[in-house]
Image: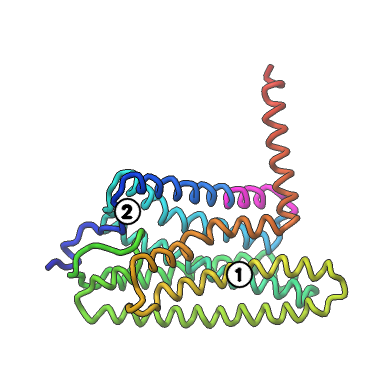
Amino acid sequence: MSNSSSITQFLLLAFTDTRELQLLHFWLFLGIYLAALLGNGLIITTIASDQHLHTPMYFFLLNLALLDLGSISTTVPKSMANSLWDTRVISYAGCAAQVFFVFFLFGAEYSLLTIMSYDRYIAICKPLHYGTLLGSRACGHMAAAAWATGFLNSLLHTANTFSLPLCKGNALDQFFCEIPQILKLSCSDTYLREVGLIVVSLCLAFGIFVFIVLSYVQILRAVLRMPSEQGWHKAFSTCLPHLAVVSLFIITAMFAYLKPSSISSPSVDLVVSVLYAVVPAVVNPLIYSMRNQELKDALRKLMTGLFSEAVNCPSSSA
């Protein structure tokens, strides 16, 4: 029997023992990762370079893209490397770092999604007060609060989890270090302290989710009073995708951390973790770019400018 002080590494979930399927997993995750890098990278570059997009909505979207890049980079590359090199190992420090950054980035992202719902509520329901309530200083403070909330929440959970005595081996049934999987290795009732903290955190998250839903109910009521169908389309195209992302994120995360052990299995845990840890980072750029004409126009302008520079550069040097 070992305890946490003697554990130097953990063993992550192996998707398969077949070498061909391991390589298939590597290429699949590589494609997903590159899609997330490209989509979020284009959003960040486009918003940062276009002055017309320096508004509260796009400022928060830029922050969301940064968080998505960080979250998927915390989990997917290590899983890809393990499949490529046919190993399951992650160091104790690496596992602690994964837990910290997963909670930090996901906590900050959820706070930011809440702020984005407030932004849409003010823009649609109280447009005359938009500039007053969401000035540049207020937006900066709200974004900083979202990042700080994620950091403090992550620090609390990471310190509490890795202070637990672990004596049930070092194998985790997950492709990244996830707190519920680490708690299964605990040999003391003190793990209930972390379980309690998770329950409290998720109850608060659910309360915020109710606030988001109520905000969108108010938005829906305001939209239905609009005389033009164009206003309906603009409001729905902005709000419904956002609500879909929030719903996917909170429902799958709550299921992952609160599901009873009777329905827990490596396959179920894997699917749920992919839905909340991988899918949003890939889907968010598609949702916000494909249904946003301003962003598509700015992206087209950026790509046209880059292409023109690339064509003119060789001719000018010649």
Rendered residue at 66%/52% (across/down): 47
Residue, disc 1: 244
Query: Is 122 colored magenta in this rendering?
Result: no
Residue, disc 2: 16
Q: 263 left or right of 244?
A: left
Instruction: Give the image location of residue 94, x and y in percent.
Output: 31, 56
Rendered residue at 78%/76% (across/down): 223
Query: Is 44 colored magenta in this rendering?
Result: yes
Q: 58 left or right of 93?
A: right
SS for tag 1? helix
- Indicate the quadrant where residue 15 lies: bottom left
Instruction: Give the image location of residue 110, x and y in percent.
Output: 53, 70
**142 versus 303 height, above or below:** below
User: What type is the residue that disc 2 sits on?
Assistant: Thr
Rendered residue at 58%/82% (across/down): 210
SS for tag 2? loop
Mark 1: give few (<14), some (14-19) or many (20+) Cα within 10 Å: few
Between disc 2 and disc 1, whose residue precedes? Answer: 2
Of labels 2 and 1, the one closer to you: 2
User: What type is the residue that disc 1 sits on?
Assistant: Ala
Magenta segment boundaries in residue numbering: 40-52
* Mark 2 and mark 1: Cα distance apart in space: 32 Å
